[in-house]
Image (cartoon, grey):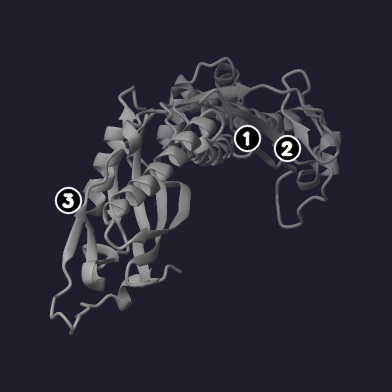
Amino acid sequence: MQKDFWALTILFLLPLCGSIAQEIQFELTKVDGQILKNSGFELVEVLDVQRKFTSIGSIYTVNNQQDKVKIKNGVPQGLKSFYNKSLQQTTTDRNIQIRVLDFTISEKRQSTSVASGELKIKFGYYLKGSFDPVHLVDYEAGITYKRSIHRTDLINQILNKGVTNSLVFFNDWIKNHATYNRKLAKSVKLEIVEKSRMSDRDTVFYDSNRPLNWNDFLDRPGRASRNNAMIFTSLAMEGSPFMDNGVLILPLEIKIYMLPGSSWVRADGKNDYSLNHEQRHFDVSRVAGNRLINRLNALELTPENYEADVNDAFFDSYREMNKLQETYDARTRHGLDRAAQERWNTILDQALKGEMEEIEKELIKGK
């Protein structure tokens, strides 16, 4: 929780001389003409999220009077101008928002001629894009000092030093994190990974060179089902993105599998015709997986949208797989219609080769 320093800010009257607190305005400028090489960002917005007043605090001046301190053109515009003028103009890849969480100055009188003070700074840096800004990093620091009450010019140096430190910090942070921080990725590269996985008693992975056999059906037959056999097939997608020289690499493996422990066959249903019907259910899942790969390869991914778009493509394909399974069973009457079964054998053989015309028609018609 941020402390509200402004709750104690008042107009300070000096009854001895009858003067009223004044305002002193300072401009944020480059320190010693320092120009930094831009690490690839532009400050496009500054939000002063805590400040209730235009002043950032108060300092002592002549006659031991406390005067309010303001930034020329206000804190947001002052900071934005300072950052943009202090960076060498280069190609910028990232739009940055600063949220000013604290930027205050306060002083205590040490004697009639000396004041001690502290400048507090806390900035939150965010990456701006098409959606909500993404938090990158916070900068928090303070500068303590002592000065002659007559040297108000030192306040301007302290303010500029504090803001310069924040700029140097963030510019270095961008430079050091750009190659491996996912939030700073410039682009996304999708890679479909093909892996050969070994099947076992728990999971049988789809393999065109390894058709199903009845030993893959380990569950007990369902008492309430009239079918001779039942197979549980599905598809999954997994991958861990990583950064490579500023590019987000997204390797994705599409896994098609059946679960022996959830698949069963009755003793009197073990024949080649029934096994083919169950194999075709497995083929339907493979076709759905291939169509998912096509969807993924057609996506135009950006660092902002890649997660949502990839997940949408997966769930669309998952729903499509279930619809195809239901349509297949409805058309073949769970394999009882031999002519329909033969037709679907052909449809699926074509689809496995990438010819999806008949599959598209079946998806439109539904069950």
Front position in the image: 177 or 360: 177
Q: Residue at x 22, y 58 (%)?
A: 70
User: Can residue 366 be seen from the camera position used here?
Assistant: no
Earlier sequence position, callout 2 versus callout 1: 1
The x, y position of residue 230, in whole percent, is: 72, 43
The x, y position of residue 74, in whole percent, is: 20, 54
The x, y position of residue 203, in whole percent, is: 78, 38
At mark 3, the secondary structure is loop
At mark 2, the secondary structure is strand
Q: Which circle, 2 or 1, is nearer the viewer?
A: 1
Q: Is residue 271 above or below residue 25?
A: above
Q: Residues within 10 Å of mark 3 (few under 14, many from 20)?
A: some
The image quadrant of residue 150 is: bottom left
Measure the alpha-carbon separation of dots 2 and 3: 67 Å
Q: Residue at x 74, y 33 (%)?
A: 274
Question: Taking 50 as reference, is 307 left or right?
Answer: right
Write down the residue under mark 1. 240
Residue type of the residue flagged with mark 3: Asn
Q: Is residue 114 above or below residue 271?
A: below
* Image disc number at residue 258: 2
Q: Which circle, 3 or 1, is nearer the viewer?
A: 3
Write down the residue under mark 3. 73
